Image (cartoon, helix red, strand yellow):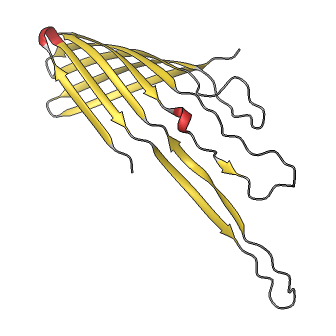
Amino acid sequence: YAPIFGGLIRGPIGLSVATVYRGESKADYSLPITADLGESFPLVIPVLELHGTAQYDPQQWTAEVSWQHAPFTLSAAATFKRWSEFPIPIHYPAVPDGWPTQPDPSFEDVWLLRFGASFTHNISLGAVVFRGGYIFEPSPLPEDQDFHNYLDNDRHVLTTGVGFTWDVFSLNVVAQWHHLVTE
């Protein structure tokens, strides 16, 4: 479990400011492997302990500013992701003598930027909302990697969507295009 807190302040002339905090969320695993070959093979085999992190979402803080003046809404947000706390995903249980110590992944903290806009058009049955946005998310990976090679890219994301609202019913269709930056 991870805590999530948020707040929203609606100001004058359609301005709003919001913030959200999401705590770190991770799932660690520990798998002891034992072998008992019975009395016919009297060697004692040590327990092999496999452990690491199967899932990790970093601690995050988001701040967003939006402006709404019917029928338009514009928003901009920045999110800080604390990837520097990312643990070693897989610990090596048995390594030869003289093997180098497994280093921390050395992920870097990043800032993610989001921009969005929407246009609402009222129709006789309800409303149609057209949406679009842009996200830039830098990779938290360090440039130089010696011991491990983790794979990731900076990415640009374009989003679009349309929503239909009738009374208490709404239907939204969205699409995203992700461009992974190659160097």
Q: Which residue is drawn at 67% across and 49% down?
A: 90
Give the residue furthest to the bottom: 39
166 vs 57, left or right, is left
Instruction: Identify whether 93 is placed above or below 162.
Output: below
Residue shown at 26%/24% (left/top)? 18
Q: Position of residue 110 (x, y in %)?
A: 51, 24
Who is closer to the viewer here, 97 or 25? 97
- Name the spot of residue 50 as percent of width and height, x first: 68, 60
Q: Seen in the image, is 23 located left or right of residue 145?
A: left
- Quadrant containing the C terminus in the rendered view: top right
Residue at left 32%, top 40%?
Answer: 4
Q: Nearer the viewer, residue 14 or 100?
A: 100
117 horizontally vs 134: left or right: left
Q: Is residue 167 left or right of residue 23?
A: left
Q: In which quarter of the image is residue 122?
A: top left
Q: Exactly how many numbered labels are in the figure? A: 0
Percent coordinates x, y for residue 66 in the rendering: 26, 15
Reply above or below: 76 against 145.
Answer: above
